[in-house]
Amino acid sequence: MGKRKKRKIQKSDNRPHSHDGKVVQKLDTHDNSKKNKQQSHTIPLDIPFDVEDRILLVGEGDFSFARSLLAHHGCTSIVATSYDSRSAVETKYPQAIAHIDELEAEDQKILYGVDVTKLGSAGGGGKEVQRVVWDRIIFNFPHVGGLTKDVNRQVRYNQELLVGFFKAALPLIAPGGSIVVTVFEGEPYELWNIRDLARHVGLKVGRSFKFQSRAYPGYHHARTLGNIEGGRGWKGEDRNARTYIFEAGEGEVQQHTSKKRKRHSLESDDDDDD
């Protein structure tokens, strides 16, 4: 994955890092409002990954987030996945075609038909997902789509989605790695109780922070159901959202590290038999 790098991406080694690997960037912006017309200020950007990280993106819509990681953050070890087939992606999000072409031109892997509750198994990316120990597994704005208009059922369906995802993703993260989930603020999303769901499967909340879409130039939130006709009326990236960083609990780290060693041993034996 990402062996051949066509693009020369300058490493941002001068960026300050916190003790937990978080990249802190400054973005110069100009407020064009009358009140602050002549003021400029810097906004700290909270980036939950580093340029060298092995990153698995799940639940991608039009792949604009994946493209931003490549083009603007210099990440070159990306596997980006979608629940939809390629034909469905192109139908729902025509703009995705250019993003996919750019990612594939830089040897970044794109997988389709990936169920986030089955990561690493059939229907969940298989060996392409299972054989890598991931530094970051990122799921932006999880949602089951319009299965029902009943709020209570929607909450339950989305909780089931997240629990299934957490269970599938936990064995795949590296020691010191994390699962990164961003959800909208307010109801009904707060009813999902995402922190409690994560704790239930053995994860702990490392930290959380306000999601800033401006940290990802070119990114546009893609609705689960596809683009709105005419391309106007709803921009999810402008809504308030929060990013949660989940890490494995101590017992889970030891358990899954042991499983990974056993798995890699079996894979080595298989290679020797070839």
Image (cartoon, rainbow, N blue to C red):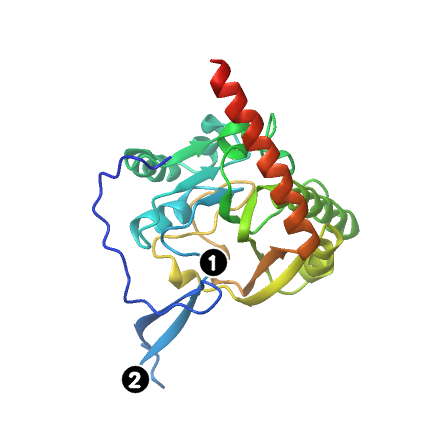
Is 57 displayed left or right of 23 in the figure? Answer: right
Question: Callout 2: helix, strand or loop?
Answer: loop
Q: Which residue is mark 1?
A: 237
Q: Quadrant of residue 29?
A: bottom left
Residue at the farthest right position:
152
Q: Which residue is mark 2?
A: 39
Q: Quadrant of residue 109?
A: top left
Instruction: Say whether residue 84 is visible.
Output: yes
Tag 2: residue type? Gln
Residue 241 in the image: state x and y as whole percent: 55, 63
* Residue at 31% in and 35% down: 3
Residue 213 in the image: state x and y as whole percent: 43, 61
Other residues around mark 1 within 10 Å, as few (<14) / some (14–19) / many (≥20): some
Residue 215 in the image: state x and y as whole percent: 39, 62
* Residue at 64% in and 43% down: 256
* Residue at 37% in and 40% down: 95
